Amino acid sequence: MSATEILARLVAFDTTSRNSNLPLIEWVEAYLDQFDVTYERVYDPTGTKACLWATIGPKDVAGYVLSGHTDVVPVDDQVWATDPFTLTEVGSRLYGRGTSDMKGFAAVCLSRLPAMVEKPLKQPIHLCLSHDEEVGCIGVRNALARIDELAPVTPLAAFVGEPTSMAVVVAHKAKWSYVVEVHGHACHSSLAPSGVNAIEAAAEVIAEIRAIGRDFEAVGPRDPLYDVPFSTSHVGTIRGGTALNIVPEHCTFEFEFRMLAGVDHQPFEDRLRAHVREKIEPWMKARHPETGIDIRLANGFPGFDTPPEADATVLAKRLAGRNDHTKVAYGTEAGLFVTMGRMPTVVVGPGSIGQAHIPDEFIEKSELEKCGRFVDRLIDHCRG
């Protein structure tokens, strides 16, 4: 099957992160069976989702990982010109949810299975298809926790096929997501000083988060290879209050730190907690002792920074036919392959990140062709 034919099959599965990805995994397994490829499912704790790990070639030799996630973001409230779960070809473009992010990469890799098994590989190629990347890089952790079983000899490199237009990405930022719950004391708004306004307290916390972000920009470390060359803070959602004439008792908001690779988020989390403990909670508790502020780390994934001179980077450039490299602000599973999988990692894949998550997502057919040449060269490399 061609990459386009396989992509059509993959797009047809609605693997929005809230859904099971098992029907897609079952289809891929049936395809792998045609080539006698060994594989293993790694289920999540619910048993409703799974990563798939397949190995082509010898298991007792160090090889390479080609990795991509199977889940996609929702199409809810988006207006599409085509059915998002039917691959639609218009000119040089293939439209459908996940075409760029990132079923296109998986389709190319699977389309090269006949070439992978045609002649013996001296070094193995591992395929890793994960789940729940879009909601915090969750699923791949289950597979990487078993990396010593799945790949008894640590791979020489992993190539994560997020949409980079086949540019070689050697680093991205870490992301740490938090939920803040503010517990105030309600009263009639005409008696506002006798209550504790949860929204106003939240605003003071948010002001400190913004101050941390300003410090990141003004005096923090910088790396000119990133599109945003410094760490950032961001408040994304806020909910609180019931009516204008009631001092709000509760307020909840979410914020994140996106840290340059190698910059520890913990000192800034500690700074925020200290500010809350020393500057905000005292006046709240002086009025009503039961009030307070809870800050919870909801999720996080590490950044990564592979040296330009590393063997993985040099090989990725040769396979991609490029001499340049770059760094990006958005996150991927790459940092987990480094920290949990203990392998050098590069992000390189077909399609544009500008197409990710938007209505009428598409991938240029030429991108699939460029990715195909990348995988073809990897196969040749693994044959020696």
Image: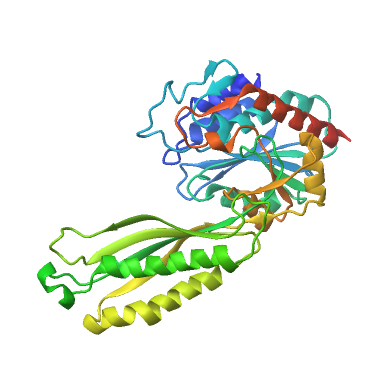
Residue 311 x, y percent position in the rendering: 82, 49
Q: Nearer the viewer, residue 88 or 203?
A: 203
Q: Residue at x 27, y 78 (%)?
A: 284
Query: Along the horizontal axis of the image, is 368 left or right of 122?
Result: left
Q: Is residue 384 above or below residue 191?
A: above
Q: Nearer the viewer, residue 72 or 128?
A: 72
- Which residue is depicted at the point 26% across and 75% down? 291
Does residue 242 appear to the left or right of 269 in the view shown?
left
Q: Taking the image as drawn, is residue 62 in sight?
A: no
Farthest-out residue, front: 218
Q: Quadrant of the C terminus?
A: top right
Q: Is residue 37 left or right of residue 133?
A: right
Toward the right, the furthest residue is: 384
Vertical arrangement, residue 137 with respect to residue 368, above or below: below
Residue extending farthest to the bottom is 286
8 lies above or below 52: above
Q: Position of residue 47 (x, y in %)?
A: 47, 44
Quadrant of the rendered image containing residue 109: top right
Which residue shows up at 34% across the image and 72% down it?
A: 293
Q: Residue 256 placed where, x, y %? A: 47, 59
